[in-house]
Amino acid sequence: MATLQTSTLSAIRSQQNQLLNDWIDGLEASGATRNLKEQDLKQQTSEFLSLIVNGLERDSGQNIAAAGWDEIRQFLEKLSHSRALLGQDSHQTANFIFALKGPLFNLLQREYKDNPATLAEQLWEISELLDALGMHTIRTFQKSRESVIKRQQEELLELSTPVVKLWDGVLALPMIGTLDSQRTQVVMESLLQRIVDTGSEIAIIDITGVPTVDTLVAQHLLKTVTAIRLMGADCIISGVRPQIAQTIVHLGLDLQGVVTKANLADALKLALTRLGLNVTKAV
Amino acid sequence: MDRIPILQMGDLLLVTIQVDMYDQLALTLQDDLSERISRTSARGVLIDISALDMVDSFIGRMIDTISGLSKIMDAQTVLVGMQPAVAITLVELGLTLPGVSTALNVERGMKLLQDRVREQ
């Protein structure tokens, strides 16, 4: 297997500045530098270049999982993580590495213009190495993105299910967003737990913020209503918009046994009546 | 053999399930309760399951059966204190207990039961 020759390494080292400038020019031309500070970019590129030279000097071979490439792998992981947080896409992040290919190939071409066999061999070596590094970057970038998405999902799940107390013995749950099995489960659990904790007799589920109601959503709602009834409390569904009412009728859904109201105010009024309370205007 | 105690309060019967239910215990309770209703001619039954934190389909059906048989023997049944997890399990099992009256706790259940009995 071919290895990088010492002459290649020394050529890279001696023309590091030239390489760096070409690389940054290439990056800017490809648009991969958007949202990045010029200073950060300079620092990152020069750090990467010196790390790659260090790695090559140690003669760590092509396998970037080897111990000699530890530093550069850590650097790339940090880099792709910061890119993920900046909201850059995988294309831009990968371009950071791949834009180095052009300047490096030019350099090698100048260096070995009299020796095509060596040139091809050295090009292949450099290309392999950069590809491996690029793949590693993409992999860690994807991982960072996934962890960001996962965290956001969890936060969204917690944010979207607040159970509020409207009155003594009346709880309300304003649902916002699409209802799926997982969310219904969380909603059901938190609402039932609050019913036990507060001893509330009436729970109002407000679906004003639910964009569509299909058979699945209706089934989830019915399950929640039944669970609430089994606990010994009553449930009112409010916020049934005209379109949703039409959809429910068109789908032929059976919402029998479920009390529905057009808006939260009506539902609260009904709840107060059931509790035997009366709201009057103070004169 | 274990038995679940059935307490009498006037013309009402009070059943509190304080231990984990298993099938034989449920069957014994069913027999005991029907026998007690007929002997005391009770008008209402209150079943407190607040200490029950696990149910399966058999226990769920048993609850349904008990309420059904007391209705036939002219006694109203109110089920009180169901835990959230139990309620979710029963719903997922498809046991919605349509004929069973429920209440949040014993106090409210008792009030509901007395109202029902008076209405009759």
Image (cartoon, grey):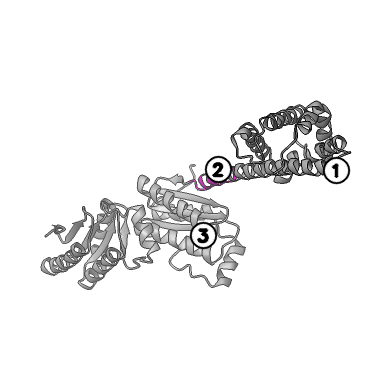
- Left or right of B4 on screen, residue A242: right
* Residue denoted by label 2: A151
- Classified by dominant secondary structure, the portion drawn in magenta counts as helix
Q: Amino acid at mark 1?
A: Pro
In the image, is residue A120 above or below residue B111? above
Q: Amino acid at mark 2?
A: Arg
Q: Secondary structure at mark 3?
A: loop
Q: Is residue A278 visible?
A: no
Residue A105 on image: x %, y %: 82, 39
Q: Please name the residue shown 40% across and 50% down the image.
A: A277
Spatial distance from mark 1 to mark 3, Cα to Cα?
82 Å
In the image, is residue B86 above or below residue A160? below
Residue A154 on image: x %, y %: 53, 45
Q: Is residue A160 magenta?
A: yes
Q: Which chain does the residue under circle 3 lie in?
A: A
- Please name whichever residue, A196 or B62, is drawn nearer the observer in this view of the structure: B62
Q: Amino acid at mark 3?
A: Lys
* Residue denoted by label 3: A261
Give the magenta-colored segment's residue range: A148-162
Residue B70 on image: x %, y %: 22, 69
Mark sitting on residue A116: 1
Q: Secondary structure at mark 1?
A: helix
Q: Please name the residue shown 70% across and 41% down the image.
A: A129
Asked if the residue under mark 3 is in contact with the one under mark 1, i.e. CB atoms within 8 Å, the reply is: no
Q: Which chain does the residue under circle 1 lie in?
A: A
Spatial distance from mark 3 to mark 2, Cα to Cα?
36 Å
Which quadrant would residue B67 be assigned to in this image?
A: bottom left
- Left or right of A39 on screen, residue A270: left
| Mark before the other along the chain sequence, 1 or 3 | 1
